[in-house]
C-alpha cells in the first residue's frame, strides 16, 4: 500500500497508459451536500482537461469515482453498499476510487475492506487524481488524505452539472467544532478564497450563460480573505454584470453582522432567503452541541434578518435526539419552530460519529431509538403543518421564478424556484429551462406550489439586477 506524500500532491500532467486511440471514460457518483457536488464538478473538470470523457453511468467506464459524505452513519453505509453494487458494472481494468469526506475519515480502511477500490482521495487531494489513476492502472493502490490549507483549486475549470446555476465554493473547512459534527475532521480548518478569485469565477459563470450562483462554505458568512468580509463578497459578486440571483449556504447564526445583513438587504441580486441552521430550540441542548448561541440569541438573529429583508424565506436544520435531550428540551424545539415559523426544515435523527466530542458523553445521556423516532415524527408533523399554513396564505401572490428542470411527474410540467426559495411547478416545455417568468401561485401541496404564468417569460438580463 502506498501513502501519497506531500511532495507529490501537485504532480505534472500524467502520461496515459491506455492505447493511444482510446479515450478513457470517467463516471462520478456524488453523495452529500452542495460542497460535494461542487467538488465533483472540479474533479470532472480536471479529468476532462486531462483527456477523459465524462459518461452518465458506470457501465463499462474506465474510471468510477464515488464522491462521499460522512455526516451521518447511514450515508456511509449507503456508500459501502453501493461500492458492492458497482462491481457488476466494472470491466477487469476499471479503476474504482472513493473520494470526499468518507474517504478522508476512513482512509486506508477503505482499501483494506474492499479489494476493488484502488484510490481513496480526500477533499484536498483532487489535484493528484490523474497521477493516482495512472498508478492504479499499474496495479498500485493509493490513499491521499493530507490536508492542504492553501488548496482552493483556482486553476481548475469546473465541469458543471447544473444547467441553470453554479455552485461556487468560497470557503473550505470549519473552525467551529460542534460536538456532533465530523466536518472539521474531514475538511480541515477554515480557509477562504480571495475575493478577486471568486469574482473572476462568477464572471466565467456568466460567460457560460448562467445567471444564478450559490456561494458555498461550511460557515459561509464567516468568510474573510484577510481584507474583505462576507458583506464585501456579497456586494462584489452581486454586482457582476449578468448575475441575476445570488444565494449562499450554509451560514452560522453567530456570523450575521450588521454589515452582512445590510449587504443582503441592499444588494438587489441577493435573494430573499436564508437557510439558518438552528439544530435545537433548547439553550441547554445547544450548549452540549457547542453551537455557541442560545435560544434567545437565535431568535434575535432571525428577527434581525426578517426586519431588514421583507418577505424573507427562512429555512433551517434541526437534530432530534441529541445526547441528553429531555422531553422538556425537545418541547423547546417544538415551540421554537412554532414561534419562528420556518418555511421548511431539514430534520435529522442524531447520528453518532466516531472521532467527534459527542462520543465522550456518558452512555446514560443517549436517547433511546424509540423516543427519537416518536420525537422525529412529532417534529416533522409540526414543521410541515406550519409550512402548509404559511403557504396557503400565499396563494394568489405573484413570484418571479427561474425554470430549473423538468418536474419529476413529467406531463409537460417544469420545476421552478422563486427568489425566496419556494419550489413552484409550472406548465411548459423544456425550452423554457433557464428562463425567468412571473407566475401566480394557484395551489400548494403544503410544501410545493403550483403556478400559472401571468406574462411572457423575460429574456435573460445582461446587467446585474436587471
Image (cartoon, rainbow, N blue to C red):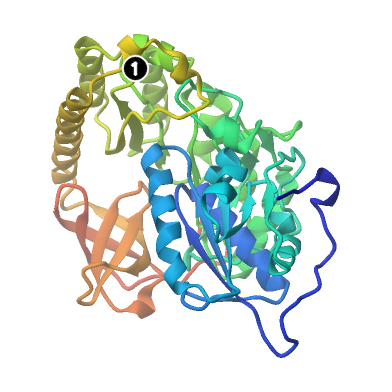
Q: Which residue is drawn at 76% across and 32% down?
A: 227
- At x 14% / y 36%, what residue is drawn? 385
Q: Name the residue under label 1.
A: 323
Q: How many marks?
A: 1
Which residue shows up at 41% across the image and 37% down it?
Answer: 72
Q: How crowded is mark 1: few (under 14 residues within 10 Å), some or many (20 or more)?
A: many
Q: Residue 109: x percent and y percent?
A: 57, 43
Q: Specify whether residue 367 is in view.
A: yes
**In the shown orientation, is residue 453 left or right of residue 56?**
left
Relative to 156, 431 lies left or right: left
Task: Give the x, y percent position of residue 282.
Answer: 31, 14
Residue occupying the far bottom of the picture: 21
Displayed quadrant of residue 207: bottom right
From the top left corner, tell me how far across and down residue 147 is, in percent: 71, 39
Toward which corner of the image does residue 105 lie, by quadrant?
Answer: top right
Nearer the observer, 168 or 361? 361
Question: Residue at 66% across / 83% down in the picture?
Answer: 23
Answer above or below: position of 230 versus 242: above
Q: Nearer the viewer, residue 281 or 230?
A: 281
Nearest the eye: 77 or 27: 77
Secondary structure of residue under mark 1: loop
Above or below — where is 310 with respect to 396?
above
- Would you say 123 lies left or right of 219 here? right
Residue 464 shows in this picture? no
Residue 418 placement (x, y as % from top left): 34, 54
- In the picture, measured across the screen, residue 166 lies left or right of residue 417, that is right
Amino acid at each position: 500500500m502506498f501513502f501519497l506524500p506531500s511532495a507529490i500532491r501537485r504532480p505534472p500532467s500524467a502520461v496515459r497508459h491506455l492505447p493511444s486511440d482510446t479515450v478513457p471514460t470517467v463516471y462520478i457518483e456524488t453523495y452529500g451536500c452542495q460542497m460535494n457536488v461542487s467538488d465533483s464538478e472540479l474533479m470532472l473538470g480536471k479529468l476532462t482537461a486531462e483527456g477523459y470523457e465524462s459518461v452518465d453511468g458506470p457501465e463499462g467506464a474506465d474510471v468510477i469515482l464515488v464522491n462521499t459524505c460522512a455526516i451521518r452513519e447511514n450515508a456511509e453505509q449507503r456508500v459501502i453498499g453501493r461500492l458492492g453494487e458497482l462491481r457488476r458494472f466494472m470491466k477487469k481494468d476499471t479503476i474504482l476510487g472513493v473520494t470526499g469526506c468518507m474517504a478522508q475519515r476512513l482512509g486506508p480502511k477503505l482499501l483494506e475492506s474492499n479489494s476493488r477500490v484502488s484510490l481513496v482521495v480526500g477533499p484536498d487531494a483532487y489535484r493528484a487524481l490523474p497521477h493516482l489513476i495512472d498508478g492504479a492502472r499499474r496495479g498500485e493502490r493509493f490513499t491521499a488524505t493530507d490536508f492542504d490549507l492553501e488548496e482552493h483549486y483556482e486553476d481548475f475549470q469546473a465541469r458543471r452539472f447544473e444547467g441553470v446555476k453554479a455552485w461556487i465554493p468560497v470557503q473550505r473547512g470549519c473552525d467551529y467544532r460542534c460536538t456532533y459534527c465530523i466536518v472539521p475532521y474531514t475538511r480541515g480548518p477554515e480557509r477562504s478564497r480571495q475575493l478577486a478569485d471568486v469574482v473572476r469565477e462568477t464572471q466565467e459563470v456568466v460567460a457560460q450563460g448562467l445567471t444564478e450562483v450559490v456561494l458555498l462554505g461550511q460557515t459561509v458568512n464567516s468568510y474573510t480573505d484577510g481584507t474583505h468580509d462576507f458583506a464585501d463578497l456579497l456586494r462584489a459578486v452581486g454586482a457582476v454584470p449578468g448575475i441575476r440571483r445570488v444565494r449562499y449556504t450554509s451560514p452560522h447564526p453567530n456570523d450575521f453582522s450588521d454589515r452582512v445583513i445590510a449587504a443582503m438587504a441592499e444588494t438587489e441580486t441577493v435573494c430573499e432567503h436564508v437557510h439558518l441552521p438552528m439544530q435545537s430550540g433548547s439553550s441547554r441542548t445547544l450548549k452540549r452541541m457547542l453551537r455557541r448561541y442560545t435560544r434567545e440569541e437565535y431568535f434575535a438573529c432571525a428577527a434581525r434578518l426578517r426586519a431588514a429583508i421583507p418577505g424573507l424565506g427562512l429555512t433551517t436544520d434541526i437534530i432530534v435526539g441529541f445526547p441528553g435531550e429531555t422531553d422538556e428540551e425537545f418541547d423547546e424545539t417544538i415551540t421554537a419552530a412554532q414561534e419562528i415559523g420556518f418555511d421548511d426544515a431539514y430534520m435529522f435523527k442524531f447520528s453518532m460519529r466516531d472521532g467527534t466530542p459527542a462520543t465522550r458523553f456518558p452512555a446514560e445521556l443517549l436517547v433511546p431509538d424509540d423516543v427519537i423516532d416518536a420525537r422525529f415524527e412529532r417534529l416533522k408533523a409540526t414543521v410541515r403543518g406550519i409550512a402548509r399554513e404559511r403557504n396557503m396564505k400565499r396563494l394568489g401572490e405573484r413570484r418571479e421564478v427561474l425554470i430549473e428542470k423538468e418536474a419529476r411527474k413529467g406531463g409537460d410540467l417544469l420545476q421552478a424556484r422563486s427568489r425566496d426559495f419556494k419550489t413552484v411547478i409550472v406548465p411548459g416545455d423544456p425550452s423554457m429551462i433557464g428562463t425567468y417568468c412571473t407566475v401566480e401561485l394557484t395551489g400548494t401541496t403544503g410544501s410545493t406550489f403550483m403556478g400559472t404564468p401571468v406574462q411572457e417569460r423575460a429574456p435573460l438580463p445582461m446587467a446585474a439586477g436587471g
